[in-house]
Amino acid sequence: QVQLVESGGGLVQAGGSLRLSCAASGRTFSGYVMGWFRQAPGKEREVVGINWSGGSTRYADSVKGRFTISGDTAKNTVYLQMNSLKPEDTAVYYCAASSYYTTNYYDPSAFNYWGQGTQVTVSS
């Protein structure tokens, strides 16, 4: 199995940028479908973006054009670059890995490995 540890969260002003890291251990992340999710207070966990085993990537409409998922196989780390941040991006961000086969990776239940989360706060 794989263990995931996120880092890089913090407080940033609207319009600013942050890069979140998700360090994987135990297994290489390229063998999994990797996802970034977020959860704001009082809201359900929602998808930010999904990367299919180092192949294609899809993003939620709310972050498309502003957020980018990338990976470094040498460091076994997945990144979430977040630009043009908005106050509504404030949430706890989670990295996740799935070893399942499903037609809907936008559902958090499709992922069986999760990091502990990192807080992102965007001030107006």
Image: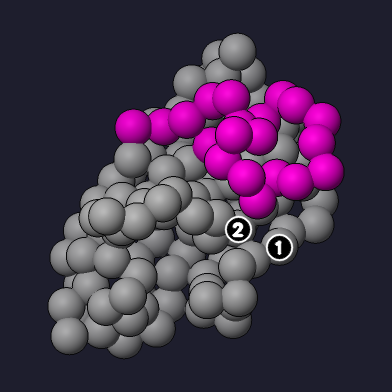
Place of residue 36 in the rendered image (x, y in percent of width and height, measured from the top left): 52, 50
- The answer, for residue 21, to whether it is visible in the render is no
Image quadrant where residue 43 sits: bottom left
Which quadrant: the C terminus?
bottom left
15 up-or-down from 22: above or below: below
Rendered residue at 64%/66% (across/down): 59
Residue 72: horizontal and vertical position, in percent?
60, 45
The scheme the figure's colours follow is one colour
Disc assigned to residue 49: 2
Is 71 situated left or right of 42 in this image? right
Q: Is residue 72 magenta?
A: no
Please tell me how crowded label 2 is: few (under 14), some (14-19), or many (20+) other residues with Cα within 10 Å: many
- Please state the extent of the stretch shown in magenta in the rendering: 96-116
Q: Earlier in the sequence, mark 2 or mark 1?
A: 2
C-beta proximity under 8 Å, tags 2 and 1: yes
Q: Position of residue 123 (x, y in %)?
A: 16, 78
Q: Secondary structure at mark 1?
A: strand
Report the amino acid beneath label 1. Arg
Prevailing SS of the magenta stretch:
loop
Q: Examine the rendering and report whether any part of residue 41 can be seen.
A: yes
